[in-house]
Amino acid sequence: MAPASEHLLQTDFNRAVSAQFAPREKRRGLHLLSMLDAELAKIRSQASDPMLRAIRTQFWREALYENEGGGHELARDLIACFSADQLMFAKLDRLILAHEKFQDEEALLETLSKEYCERQAALFELAHSYLLGGESERSCDFYLQCGKAYGGGQFICRHRPLFIGNEEHGQRLLHQTGVALEEISADLRKLAPRGRAAVLPLALAAPYLDLYQTSDRAGGQAIDLHAARKLWLLWRAIRKGFD
């Protein structure tokens, strides 16, 4: 992996590894999508004022579509990678919109979990469209459910301390995640193999649910699946599908 991609292993291990199962010429593009998401996610933590958040988010839109990168290396890389396919390039704005949607809201647990799930939905749609040549194989609702299934399970595990004393929201998110996973299970089995790597993190959705349900929820630390188990689950899904 290139240095930037190696950094992605620290910020989004699941997608960084999943991208390695894509065709070699597509891996860089998948990495760049996750890197854009990480940069947009920084805005909430770096700026407390909604107006400042809006300005920083708008920078990315203008850098991509008006200012030839705006002097930012990642923006230039995104343009170089995606601009030849105008349909795919235009879709990058969907990820920006997913972040922008929640900028005016306080960083409450329910807001953060919704934002995270919608970000994941946008990433699934963009990555899948990219592997399929700019076209989405499924409806927007399918990707939204994918975001809930994967994002919900991962969120409650990674942010478990936040749910202590707020079990009601944890149970709601757990239920939402399970329902979403059930709704997309049949569609996942039908996905074309050439686009499978884009949605590969969904192979971890059910294990995340199991991990949370079997853990000591009174614990004060985040939990995650072991890296070796993730690799095996992802490898199995890429070879055999989502059965």
Image (cartoon, grey):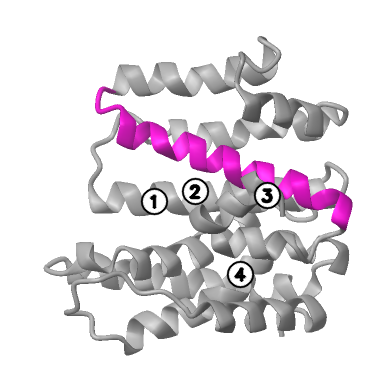
According to the picture, the residue beneath numbered tag 2 turns out to be 118
Residue holding disc 1: 114
Q: Which residue is mark 4?
A: 202
Question: Which residue is at the front of the view, 56 or 87?
Answer: 56
Residue at image point 47% right, 78% down: 225
State the predominant SS element of the stretch in magenta: helix
The CA span between labels 4 and 1 is: 17 Å
Magenta stretch holds residue 212: no
Contact check, label 4 and label 2, Cβ < 8 Å: no
Farthest-out residue, left:
165
Q: Residue furthest top?
A: 67
Label 4 sits on a secondary structure element that is helix
Depicted 153 relative to depicted 19: above or below: below
What residue is shown with label 3?
Answer: 125
Distance Cα–Cα, label 2 vs label 1: 6 Å
Amino acid type for the residue under numbered disc 3: Glu
Q: Amino acid at mark 1?
A: Lys
Name the kind of residue labelled 4 in the image. Leu
